[in-house]
Amino acid sequence: MIQGNAPSPWTGRSLLPENPMSRLATMIALAVSMPVVAASAGDETCGRELEESFARGAAGTLYERATLVTLSGFPRLKLVSDFQPSTWGTWISPSIDETVLEFTASFRYSLKNFQGGPGDGFSFCFGDLSNVGGTRPSGGEWGIEAFNTDGGGLSVGFVTYPGAGGNGVNGRWGGTDFAFTSFDHSRMRYDDDQFAGDPNNMATAVVHWSRQSGTTVTIAKPTFPPETIFIDQGQPQTASVDPTGWSFAFAGRNGGIDQDVLIGDLSISMVVECPAEENPADLNDDDMIDGAYLGLLLGAWGPCTEEPCVGDINGDGVVNGADLGLLLGAWGPASP
């Protein structure tokens, strides 16, 4: 039974005191006395896209012989050029600020070699490329020098020269193979660069990577359906990495047999960790919502008179019970 003049629970009215300051004191007392339960950050993820046609003014940085060209009316990245033996060229994307958890990269590639046979090859890379001094950006079908030196970084190598132990596709982490599959790239080799740059004559490669499953590669030769090269390889090598601020790259080289290495129509879909959002109830940015916040909020009680208005959590121009309710609802360790 409800004693005294307290309202019936069936009226829907609050059992807190009617006096605003008494009500405030009661809410504070309840909040301070309640157990603190830390909120879980969860596993929220976001999407991000990187589209690059390699037209003039393309994003990213070109190194050594890498250049942007137009062939048959289509923009292409030319990593190295025919008639320029013993050279290398690399393109590196802007760094991805978020932590990449998974990506699917698709791109076209072809080779132009006037001497009649494919040269050495190129690689698609993903890793920490914040230090690109000296020859660290150099690379080829074996990956990129920075990855070999640092012992980290993912590369998928397109080994186009059969004289180097058989052509194919490799997967590497930090310069160490975790996969290799034979594959004949000669169908994508042409005598004329304009013909080689036509998208109808280029192969389409797809590289998928995640920390949970590793690396999968497929290649579709011109007019042919995709072929699976390898599936879910290299997961133990990359399961524990922290791919925050990493970049994508292409690296190609010419040896004794030189060629054009042409790349086009790069599209990368990424799953990234969502950036943390500021908790509006975290008034003094100490990641803890406690009595110190109550002092700040109560000290600013009433209409806002200056900007920023400390305590106006909901942004309605006044510090009142609505803001207090939001603060009490977020009591404890601050989480976005």
Image: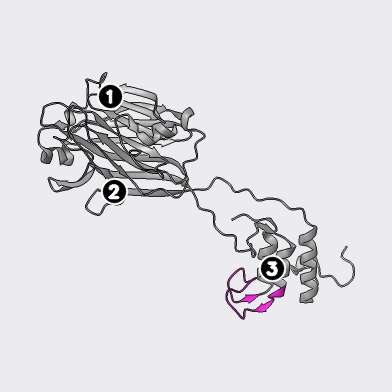
Mark in the foreground, 2 or 3:
2
Tell me the element at label 3: helix
The residue wearing badge 3 is: 324
Comparing 263 with 8, the one in front is: 263
Q: CA distance from mark 1 to mark 2?
A: 26 Å
Q: Is residue 36 left or right of residue 232?
A: right
For the stretch drawn in magenta, what is the main secondary structure? Answer: loop
The residue wearing badge 1 is: 168
Using the image, tell me which numbered label, if any, was put on residue 52: 2
| Residue 252 magenta-highlighted | no
Give the residues drawn in magenta, as a range.
Answer: 299-319
Residue 75 visible in the displayed image: no
Q: Position of residue 271 (x, y in %)?
A: 44, 44
Q: Position of residue 210 (x, y in %)?
A: 44, 36
Task: Check disc 1 and give the amino acid type.
Answer: Gly
Establish if 5 lies above or below 81: below
Around disc 3, counting alpha carbons within 10 Å, would you say few (fewer than 14), some (14 to 19), or many (20 or more)?
A: many
Task: Check disc 3 and give the amino acid type.
Answer: Leu
